[in-house]
Image (cartoon, rainbow, N blue to C red):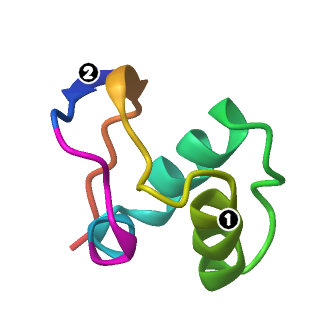
Amino acid sequence: MTTIQSEHPMTRNDLIQLQRANLQHVAKLHRIKANQKTHVIIDQLLEKHPQGVVLQGVSLPLCVPLV
C-alpha cells in the first residue's frame, strides 16, 4: 500500500486523475458506494466535502496498469 499525504484538498480534477481502484478505496473510506460510475463517486465525494477531499495518511493500493 502507498500512503498519500495531501496538504491541499483534492478537487474534481485531482480526483479524476486517480486510478479507479484508488478512487474506489477513497469512496469506501468516506462511506460512499464504490461500485458506481466514476463520475458519480466523484460527485458524491464533493457533495460530502465541498471544499475538497482531504487525503491525510490514506493508504491506497498500489495500482500498476497492465501494459
Q: Which residue is mark 2?
A: 3
Range shown magenta: 8-13
Quarter of the image for residue 19 reads bottom left
Residue labelled with disc 1: 47
For residue 11, what is the image quadrant?
bottom left
Specify few, some or many for label 2: CA neighbours under 10 Å numbering under 14, 14-19, or 20 or more. few
- Give the alpha-carbon distance from disc 2 to disc 1, as whole Å: 24 Å
> What amino acid does circle 2 point to?
Thr
* Horizontal relation, residue 12 to residue 6: left or right: right
Q: Residue at x 30, y 48 (%)?
A: 9
Above or below, 42 against 29 in this view is below
Q: Residue at x 67, y 68 (%)?
A: 41
Dot 1: few (<14), some (14–19), or many (≥20) neighbours within 10 Å?
A: few
Which secondary structure, mark 1?
helix
In the image, residue 58 above or below residue 10 = above
Image spot of residue 39 (x, y percent): 61, 83
Q: Nearer the viewer, residue 1 or 12?
A: 12
Q: Position of residue 42 (x, y in %)?
A: 58, 70
Left or right of 14: which side holds 44? right
Q: Residue furthest front?
A: 51
Mark 2 or 1: in front is 1
